[in-house]
Structures are given as structure tokens and as C-alpha cells.
Image: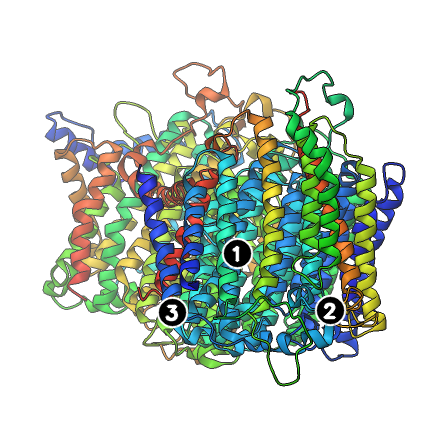
Amino acid sequence: MEYIILITGLALILMGLYGIMYIKNIFRIVIAFALFDTGINIVMVTIGYLRNGMAPILDKMPTEGTTPAIVDPVPQALVLTSIVIGLGVSALMLTYVLKLYEDKKSLDINSFKDLKW
Amino acid sequence: MVAPIYIIAIALGLAFTMGLFGKQLKNIAGVLFIAGLGSLTFISGQWLWNFMVNSAATEIIYTAGFKPPFAIVLQMGFEEAVLTTMINVAGLLGALYLFPLLDKKGNNAMMVYLIFIMSTNVAVMTSDIFNLFVFTEVESIALAGLILLTGQSKAFQAGMKYLIVSGISSGLLLLGIIFAYQFSGSLTIIDMINANLWAVKASSIAAFLLIVAFIIEMKPFPANGWGIDVYTAAHPGIGAMVSAAGASASLYVFYKVMPLVNGNDWYYFIALIGAITFVGSNLVATRQENPNRLLGYSSIGQVGFLMMILGLQDVLGERTLIISFSILISHYAAKAGLFWISGILNAENIKDWSALRKNPILLFLFGAFLFALIGFPPFPSFFGKWELIMTLSQTGNYSWIVVILVASFIEGIYLFRWLGYAIKLDHAQLPAFKTPWYQLIPIMSMGLILFGMSAYLTHVFNFGPAINYIPLLFVLAIFAIDFLPAYIKNTVSIAGIAYYTYYLWPSLENDLLRQIFIGIFLGGAILTLVAGYAKKGTRAGFYPMALMMFAGLVGLIEAKSMLQFFFNWELMTAGSYFLIIRGKRSMPHAYSYILFSIAGAYAILMGFGLAYGSQLNGNLDALSQISLLPALAYSLLAVGFMTKTASLGLHIWLPGAHGEAESDVSPMVSAILLKAGVFGLILLFLSIGVDNPNATTLLYVLGWVGALTTLIGNMGAVFQEDAKRLLAYSSIGQLGYILFAFTFMTHMGWLAGFTYTINHFMFKAILFLVIGGIVVKLGTHNMYEMGGMIKKMPFSFIAVLISIIVIGGIPPLSGFAGKWLFYNAVIEKGWYFQGAIIFFAGIVAFLYLFKLIYSVFLGQLKDNHRNVKEISAWILIPSYILIIGIMIFSAFPQYILQPISDMIAPHFQSETITWTGSLATTSLGYWDATTIMIVVGTAFMLLLGWLIWLSAKAQKVEQFNIVFAAERPFRPETTHVSYNIYAGYQKALGWIVAPGITNFWNTMSTNLLEFAGWTRRIYSGSIQNYTLHVILFIVVFYLISIGGL
Amino acid sequence: MLMSSTMRRIIARVSGRIGIPWYQPWIDLTKLYSLRTQISHGTMFYLGPVFRLMGGVGMFLFMPMIFGSDLWSNYSFSGDLVLILYFQFFGMLGMALGAGEGGHPYSAIGISRGLSQFTTIEVPMTLAVISLAIQYDTLSIAKIVEAQQGGIMHWTLFTNPFATVAAMLSLLGAFGHSPFNLVKAPNEIPIGPPTEYHGTFLGVLRTNSAILHVAEAALFMNLFFGGASNWFELIIKTFLIYFWSVFVGTVFPRFRIEQSVVWFLKWPTIIGIIAIIIYL
Amino acid sequence: MLKKILILFLLAGVGLIFFDLFQSYQSASELTTTAKYYADNGAKEVGAANLVSAIVVTYRGLDTLGEVSILFVTAAIISFVLKHKPEEEDKNRVIKPASEILNTATVFLTPVMIMVGIYIFINGHLTPGGGFQGGAVIASAVLLIFLANPKFHLNHSIIAFVESISGVAFVVVGALGLIMAGGFLDNRILGLGEFGTLFSAGALPIIYIFIGLKVGAELSNIVGILAQEQNIKN
């Protein structure tokens, strides 16, 4: 099970990279980046997965010496953070795209080569 | 003590609060902003103080009150204190600098700036890797915002590239973190390190992803186009932040996480990447004209350098930190300062930096920053590099040394071109610029930091004794009174030098060699400075630099250790560079001079490194038994010194540099400065010793080089039309004699060498003084525009006449001593053919000597010179003092040569010269200077008397009364035959001086630049290409490091 | 003086004229010394001839003339072969400067040519001298002469033929007769250093050139032809050495400057190098 | 074309890295030390049923602070980049009015969504969810409004006020933790209360409320500014 998810995540990352490097439309590049991010997040969640563990939400205070059978809560916490960060980054990117478009009236990535050498 | 956690609390609290202030309360926001940064600086500063003074223990901050690894832990140790202080100081000054801009953009901009600084602090302090990730993200996003402060479309493009690439690298970082976490079961860096991730392949990939992400953050060449664009597009004030604060932080972070891959090869790879970056960025920068982008390349190069040092930490051991710090702090202060200056000038092209001359303070700081980057004394980077090279060669890592030196040289290529532009280019029609206090203060404080750290690190490295403070302080004093008129400073300088000579002399008792050179250096200094009285005005900046050069020269004499020697060598180089570049058209020549000098200095440095490595003691006598690659070491040292003596192949800088220099600078650099190289060679040869198996070939080759240098130099002089260039070429020739003589390693040879050294000092000083004076008087360098000066300037004529008799080696004057000794030495040594070349060259000298004296003093007086007067007495006085010296040396050479031969006798078993009174005898021949003088003198008088008796009735006639086909030439130009009078000779032998060597160097530099231009095409400006580079970098690095390639 | 007249006779004979009587040069000289009007272009112009003459006289003074005679070894104790070699320059330089102040273009041209040619003339000479120094392991002329005593076969001419040839070739240039007389082409145009000189000055110069020639001839005699032990020998030998150049001069056309420069760097130099190599 | 091949080649390289990663990966059989510690003591120490929240807010509260500041910075940047004076907008820009359904839905749903959001972050320590999730829901409510009425004007000053106050409160609570309890962001400045009830887990819910408000405000702010951008006359 978790292997499949892992593969999915990794595949998503690759797709994202492909998009970033190949697609010409800058707006779609942002989408591709989001894809890449999602892939990362999926991988992260998968790592925390534990066979037949429940969500890390306890219904009662665990008794001494017995560890509740839950999945690893840490990656979930981390993933939460990384999602938010990704959100921020993509919001920022979109703003950039807006401004770039205002500036050149074009979404083609090749029209933004003013800085070189 | 305020807990470091308040850095976060205060910064964030303030940032959040600022949202409350609207337009109306903006001023309060501004005040709070600065105050907040101030308090950040205070907190980190007090911790630093706490560590340095009370040597407190490292402070651990447990957030949420739980022990690690279960909660995030910050750490405030000594290093963190240093780094955070650096960051916050830069942040505070930068905020001051940027304040108007931030103020214009409103509270939001200030918030972003504040959070940028805060997150940089946390990244330094945290010891939890995920927390590190979070705050580096905060940092990069905040930066992405700060880039936009200029609001230009370029900024948006750069920001986009930056966001995408850093996003990708942080994604990889996350992958690495999560897998490393699964393996180590913890998120604190230390636990991950203890888990030995690199040991198992599974986790080694995680470790790889972690490290590669951090490496990408440091913009390795060539996967760094995205980073450079940030420097280019962002406001220079932000560039300063990125380069000073950001780079320092990311380096420290890298240093923290490096142990994650503490595998056998990993550090090697890291060092390699660093080296490639160091070389690559500097190389590409050589073609750059935009100041900010140039600084960007240079920053990345420096970061690469530091990365390399960190990668070599296994080799460097406990020196690593101090070395890297000394490099880092120079980079920190210099880059911040330079970026800020750039912000003030706001020029698109480094050529426009000549506007800087309108503000001397900034110009001075600019120079200081550049020299700090290159690693000149007394700046921290100098000691850092020295320490680094010594340690590396001690451990036999020569290839790394080569890399470092090559890269530093390339760095010099563009930095000094830049400096030259700033000092020389015309700035008349450049727009004026304002330097408001809030922008000046940050720059000046960075300057202060730089100098302060220099002093501090000198103390830390315990290099204090290396520096002869008295002259340096004197230089500073002169600099302080630079505004005074020239003659006052002149007097002060002369007095100072005279006093120092007096003070130094006792310490040189029974060390004739050093006495001779102190005489040449300081005596020459005084004489040439006397000529300076002829100059009017303040001559701003002349005296500090001249004295700096002389301080360096004195230091060479005093040097006991290699460090002292090198320190003063660099000091002298810097001073002379500024002297030379003062000339009107001397920008390109000073440029080539400094480049050759740096290259030479690095050769010397490497040679010293080998000596140190083999002897493990820093004293100069370590040179005498070099066991590591001795042949190479000696060759390097020789080449290094020969860059100063302008020997064949390394001579192309000299004609321009000496020819274009000011009239009293030429004698300084020609008669005095060149002798520094001679001094170095003498020291080298002495320590090599006679028939040292490692140096026989070297000496033989050098002998040939010397001979050919003489020929080329004299030949070159023959075909000059510019009087000073003619003298410059003759200097090359004379130095060739000297080099040749010393390579004999025999008694006679060395005696000849010393004779030539002393002679050349005297007559070249005279010639450059007088000719320089005449050139100034007549306002032209071209000899064919002069003529007939003998009637106007008889005293100059006599001075020149005497000195050319000396050069020609015509008896009875002292030049003949050199020739005679040479004949004996050559025949004794058996270097007949070299000897023949030398003598041939000696005769060739007559051609240019005649051309010089004839076309300047004889021939036809030009109409526009009808009423010129004799040159200034201030120039004639030193010349005539020197003439007296020549006369004494000619009549009674034994008084000088006999002690010298006693001095060098112990060094050579070869047959010596015996003195009976004034009669010198060798197994070959004999020579009695005094008698010759007397005979010639009397005979000359007799003949003169006879002629006078014969032609008493001789009458003076006008200039044009000549047998000119019964015509009267109507213009002097038509009958003054001077231009290219050796045409026939050139036809026959001109090929000898065909500018092959110059062409060679030109081709070299062109190719280098071409290559740079070709390399930098990878920075195509396309986001996707940059992403491509990064991915490519990652893949290749992976395949090499883990993929088993 | 006798030589110069005879030289001109020979030239004349070869070129099929009767030529001048042998006493002609003396007539010229007396005329020159007694000329009324004399002009000077300045101090250096005035000193030039003195320097020149000094060069010639100096060579005499520092060279042992007759082997074994203390009187006629002159001041040779104060300097060796090197001194002699470099003393030639003394006169040359003075001449050049004096002529230079004359301000006549021809003078300058002549000097530049002379110097150019001279540089290369000296190359074979230097090589020869070095070769001698190696051969006799001394630079003292007296010693060299001493070593050549006892029969013609001991002369350097035979013991070290290459050096001799090289030196003799360079002597051609040193005397400055055809084919190397471009410096002061005597016959057709009044060109060369002496252009501006006349009257007493020219006289001094003439005297000097005579002395110089003899001196150089004597030097060669000492170096290569076993020196002289009495006046007669001295005169004969110098005479012959001198005429060698004259004969050559009469049969060869004049070289242009670059030609002569190159010529001296070809054969004479190579021979000189051989002269050294054989002693390596 | 060549570029495409190169890209594919590179992706193959990255794929190789991932393949190695995947090959050498074996799924965890038991909790890591850290996780085990949280599972055992999390409830006891923090008093939150939702361990993730416990970690996010308390154990790794500093990260959360970082997150918040990221959103904050983003909002700030966006607002100073896309700041426009009102006169730049063209009032008479005609937009096709939103469909009836959307309008009605907006009217009904917006309050509900906001309530749900608030519920989510108030119960963040008990049930799945928390400040960020709640804030996001609120922001989506705002987005809905914008969809319905593109010319809707968000009162930025109020939003800024909420944002700032909640942010400052967050920091202050953290600092209180430093003063009154074990360290910065320690939630034990208040009693842990009875496990599983609303008023438990010390300051955790309070922090979450502030986070929720802040995130909500920031996100809606971003949405608002971006939405406004379309009204600018070019």
C-alpha cells in the first residue's frame, strides 16, 4: 500500500520537474511547481505511515507502558508546515506572474530574459 | 543577559505590530523598526561580549520547555554569537542605508526586512534541521520580497527564477529530511550526525539530498544563474544584505550540517565544488561590466572559496575556523561596503565609477575594500590566505594551493581593472551624486570593521611581530596631513626617512648586504624626494603611497621571517601600484604592472609555502634547505622576484609603467623599486648556495635569460622615440646584466653584479630625474621634438653625459669596472656565448645612448624652445650628489668593492680578486682605476690645451651656419636628424625586438577573456535553463558521489 | 700618415690613375693647421676632437708597443686588454657628440651608421678576444705577446687561426675603408661625422685617425702576430696589417649599412664562435 | 527538441536517485524514538488529544511561528507589490453578473463556512484540524464572496488589525511561556485541564485561535488583493 503511494509521490515530483523545465507558459509552470510540492508532501506523509496504525488522535489518556497504536504524528506535523509554506510560495509566484504579465503582456517564459551573462 | 529567544520574539512582535500602524503612524513604525534592529544587534552583541570577555559556556535554549529531540532547541555558542552579531550589524546598517526606500514602500517593506534578518538569525542558531528548513524558507521568501523593492520588471524576473530554484532545492531538502528522520528517528542535526547517515546506502541518499540542497543554496558554479540575477536586479542595498548577512549565514549553516556526510570522499567533493565555483565565477566575472553583477560573481566566488576551505577542514584541522573567519569577515565588510557604494553611484557600468573621485573618502574605502578582497596586507584575508597556504603545503596539498592562487589571480584581473577605471577614467561629464549621511555612515562603519578586524586578527594570528609598525604609523600620519601643501609633506617625509635610516643603521652592523640596499632604498628615497620640491600644489595621495612603498622596502630589509618578507613585499607592491598609476596615461601600464606583481607574489607565496612545509619554521633561512620539490620551489621564487626585475618574458609591463610615470616617480620605481627584486634574488641565490644540485639547471637557464634580457632591453631602447621609454628599456637591459651576473654564483660574477647594481642605481636615478625634468619643461616625450638643449641646460647635459659614459662602460668611469669584472667572470665561468651576447648588447647600448644625448641636447634647437630655462635646481641637486658618488666610485672603487668581496668571499670557493691599493688583480688580468683616471685626466687636459692653443681664434657662430649646400635651412626640424635614425639597423636586426613576447601575453589574455565570454553564455537568462543546470548539477554530483561513477 | 698616402696611391693605381705624391697628406695637414678662419658650434663641438684624439692617444698609452721594453710598454700596467677594447669608445663617443652639436644632418646620419656598423664589428672581435683569453688564460697584452715569442709558428696567427681570421675581418670594419666606409664616404659626398669640421679641428681629426689606425694595427700585431721586439719590426708589421684592409677595400664595392651589419654577424661571427668552440 | 531529450535524460537521472531511494526504503515497523515519545507522553505533557496539534503548536511551536511569519511575509509582500491607489480602478468596468445559484449560495454558505472554520480551529486540539485549516476555510468563504461579487471591497484595515493583534498575541503567549513555564511557546502557562475536553491542553487552543484568526485574515487578505488586481485598468 504505502509503496504505491510513495511511487505516486515520486512520480508527481518528476512530473512537476518536467513541467517546470519544459512548459513555456509561465502560469502553468507555477501549477507544475505546485504539483512538485504536492509530490513532496505525499512522500512525507507516506514515510510516517505505520501498518495498521490509527490517526494520531487519542480518545483517552494512554496508560503507562502501553504505546497507543497510531501512525507517526511527526511527519504529519511537518507536512502541515510544508503545505503552508508551499501555499505561501505559490501565492507569491502567482503575484510575480501577475506583475510579469502586466509588464510584458505575455506569459511565454522566453520573453523574460532581460538578465543574462 | 537577554535570552537569545528574544531575537525572535522582538522581531516578530514588532513585525506583527507594524500592521497596526497605518499611514499616519508611519514615523513611529520607522523608529520602532530601527529600534528593533538595534535591540537585535544589542542582544547578539552582548552574547558575543559575554563569550569573549567572560568566556561563558554555550547557551542552550529549550523551546516549549522540553528536551531535544522532542522539542526544538536553539543554541547560542561563540560561533553563533559571532555570526548573529555580523548579521545584525549588517542588518542595522543596511536598514539605515535603505531607510528612505523602505519608508517609501511603507510598513510592509519594513516588516519583510525585519523578518529577513530574524529568520537569518534563527537559521544560524537552531539545531533542529526541520526548523532550519522552515526558517531558511522564511528567509528566502522574505528575500524574494526584498528583491522587488526596486519595482523594476528585471527584479520580478530575477525573483521568479530565485523562487523556482530555491523552491526545488527546498523540496529536495524536505525529502532528505524526512528520509533522514525515518532512519535516525530524530530531527535534531546532532542526532542525525550520530546516526552516520552516510554509512548505509539507504540513508546516504537522504544525506545526499540534504547536503546537495544546502550546496545549491550556496549557488555553486555553474548552477547559479538564478542567484546572480538576484544580485543584478535587486537594489544594491539588498545585494549587500544577501552577500554579507545571507552568505555568512548559509555558510555557517552548511558548516553545521556538513558532518552529516562526514564520509571519506564527501568533504573532498565539497572542496572540489567550492574550488570550481571559486575559479569559475571569477573567470566569468572578468567579462562583466555591470558593477552589481560583478560583485555578485565575486561574492559567489568568495563563498565557493570558503566552501572549499570547509571541505578541506580535515586537512586544516583546528585552523579551519579562524582561517575561514578571516576570509569571511573580509568578504563581509568589503562586499557590503562595495554594494553600498554601488548604490550611491547607481552606475550601470564600472567605467562610470570614475565619478567616485568626486568623493575621496569613498574612493579610499573603495580601494581598501578591493585590496581586502584580493588579500593584501594588512587585511584579514591576507593572514587567512597565508595561514591557509602554509598549512596546505605543510600537508602536501599543492594542487589546492595552485587552485587558490589561480583563482585569486583571476579575481585580481577584474578587481584591479575596476580600480584603474575608478582612479583614471575621465569623470568630467558624469552625473554628480549625493552621499547623504545615512548612506555614508554604514559604508564608513564597514571600513572601520574591516580595519578593526585586521588589527584584531593580527593579534589572534600572533602576526604582530611581522609588521614594522613605525613606518606604517608614519604613513598614516602623512595620510592624515595629506591636505597640506606638497613641500611641507616633502620635508616631513624626508625627515622621517632620514630619522628611520639613522634609527635602523645600528641594527645592520656587519651586514654589508643590507647596508648596501638600505643605502639604495632609503638614500634613493631621500634623493628622489628632494626632487619632489619642484612640484607645486598638494599632490594629494602621493606621499602616503610613496612612503608606503618605502616602508615595504625597509620591511624587506628588516624581514627575518618569510611572513615579514611577504607582508612587506605586498605592501611595497600596493604602494608602487598607486605611484605608477598617477601618471597621465598610465592606467593600462599600472594594470599590467599589478597583474604581473600579483602573479609574482603568488609564485613567491607558493615557494615560501614549500619552504615552510619542508622546514616547519617560518624564518627566511628555511629557504636554504627546501626538501619538498626544491627545484620547483626555487624556480617559483626566482620567477616571482623576476617579475619585479622585469626579466625577459616578464618585462612587458616596465616600459609603459616607467615611461608614463610622473617625473620623480620614474626614478623611484626604476632606480629603487627594481632593486627590491634584485634583493630578493640575492637572498634566494645565497640560500640556494653554490652547486646546489636542485638549482644548477635553474641557474643556467636564468643566466641565459639574463643575457637575452640585456640584449632585448638594449635593442628595444635603440628604437624608441620616447625619451622615458628609452630609459625604461635600458633599465630592462641593465637588470638583465645584474641577473646574469648573480647567476654565475662565483666571486667575480657577484662582484660584477653588485657593481652593476650600485651603478644602475646612481645613473638611472640621474637620467630619469634629469630627462623627466626636461620632458616636463618641454612638454613632450618625443626626442625628435627636442634638440639643442645643451645651450639651454648645460648642467643637465653634463649630468646626462656622465651617466651615459658610465652606462657605456667607458673608462675611466665606474661603468668600466663592471665590464672588466664581467670579462674576468665570464672567462672564468666559461659562459662564453652568453658573455658574447652580453658584450654585444653592451655595445648596442651606445646606439641608444647617443640617440638620447644627441637628439635631446645636440642637433638643432627648435623654435618653440628658444626661451626655455635650465630645469629646476631641486632636480639637479640630487643628480649632482649622485654624480659625486659616481666619481668617487670610479676613482676609488676599492673602498666599496673590497668590503663587498670580503663579504661574499665566504660564500664562494671560486678564485677571488686581490686588491693591492687601487690595483685589482685576477688570474686573468688587472685593472687600476685610480691610475687610469689620472692618466686619462692629464692626457685629456694636455690635448685640450694644445687644441686651445691651436684654435684660439675660433669664433662662435649661429645655429644655422653650417655647410648646407650653401643654403641656410629655414626650419630646425628639417635638419634635426633624430626620428628613426637607426632605420638601417632596424632593417638588419630589428627582428630581435619584434614584439613576440607582448603578443604572447596579449594572446593569452585575449584567449582567457574569450573563454570567459564563452563560459558565461550558460547564463542565458532563461529560468528553465537555470533549473536545468541545477538538476544537472544534482544528477552529476549524485552519480559521482553515490551512483558509483 | 705615410700609410694613408700610400693607400691612396694604391687605390689610384688599381683604378688606373697616377694618384697623389706620397707627401700629399702632410701638405694637407699643414694647410689645415694653418687655416685662418675657424668657427665653433659650441663647447661640445669644441671638445669633440679632443675626446677623439684622447681615444687614439689613450690606446697608445695603455698598450705595450715593444715587447720587453719598459719604456715602450707605456701605461699598460694600469689596464689589460679589456681596457684597450673599451677605450676605443672614448674617442668615438666624443667624436659623435662633437659632430652632433655641429647640427648638420649629415653628421648625425654618419654617426648613426657608424655606431650601427660598429656594434656588429665588435662581435667577432669580442669572440676573438675571448678565444685568446682562453688560449693564453690571461687578458694582459704583455703576457699574450710573451707567449708568442720564439718563432713564427708560435704566433696566434697559426696557434689560433680562427680567432685571427675573425679579428682581421672585424678590423676591416674598424678601419672603415671600403667596403665598410659608408660611415664617412670620403670621395663623392662630404658626408659623415667630420662634415662640419675644418681647419684645426679637422687637422686634429686627421692626426687622430692616423694614430688610431696605427694603434689598432699595433694592437693586432701584439695579439696575433707575435708583437714587436724593436721599432723596425713594429713598423713593418703594422704596415702589413694596415694594408690588408687597404687591399680588400680596393677590390670590393661599398656595402649599404644593413648589408654590412648583417655581413659581420654572418661569417666573422661564425668563425669567432668556432674559435671559441675549439677551446671548450 | 534537443532540449527535450536533455530534459528527459535529466529526469531519468533524478528518477535513478528516486529509484535508489525507493529500493532502499522499507516501511517502518514501529514508531521512531521521537514518535514513540510523543505517543507515550504527548497527551500527558501537553494534554491535547490531537497529537499532531500538540506537536505543531507546542513541541515544534517554533516551526509554526515560522509558518505564520511565512504567510505574513507573503501577505506583506503581495500587498506592497500590488498596492494600488483607488483611482487606478475603473469603476465602470462591466462584469457579467454571477449566476443566481452562486449568489444565493454565497448568501447562505458564507456564514456557515466561517462558523465551520471557527469550529475547526477552536477544536484543533481535540479533532483533526487546527488553526491553519480553520483559517483556510474562512478564507475560502471570503473567496466565495469575491466570486459572487468581483467588485466587493475588503476592509483591509480591519483585516490588518485582526492579523496584527492575533500575531502579537501569539508571540506574547509564547513569551509568557518563556517567563511562566519551561520555555518559549510552552503551553503549560494555563492548567492542562481535563483530557479531551474543550478547555484543556493549556494555552494550545488559545494559540490555535490566534493562528486561525491570523491565517484566516492573511489568506483573505491575499485573496482580496489578488482579486482586486483584475479591477485595475491597464
Under tag 1, what secondary structure?
helix
Q: Nearer the viewer, mark 3 or mark 2?
A: 2
In-image side of B1007 versus B176 (left or right): left
- Residue B443 shows up from this direction: no
Q: Nearer the viewer, residue C71 or B985?
A: B985
Q: Which amino acid, by three-letter code, is at mark 3?
A: Ser
Relative vertical location of residue B789 with respect to residue B259 in this rendering, above or below: above
Q: Which residue is mark 1?
A: A41
Pointer 2: what residue? D196
Q: Nearer the viewer, residue A87 or D190?
A: D190
Rendered image: mark on residue D24: 3
The chain containing the residue under callout 3 comes to D
Subunit bearing disc 2 = D
Residue D103 is drawn in which quadrant? Answer: top right
Q: Are marks 2 and 1 on the same chain?
A: no
Q: Are marks 3 and 2 on the same chain?
A: yes
Q: Chain of mark 1?
A: A
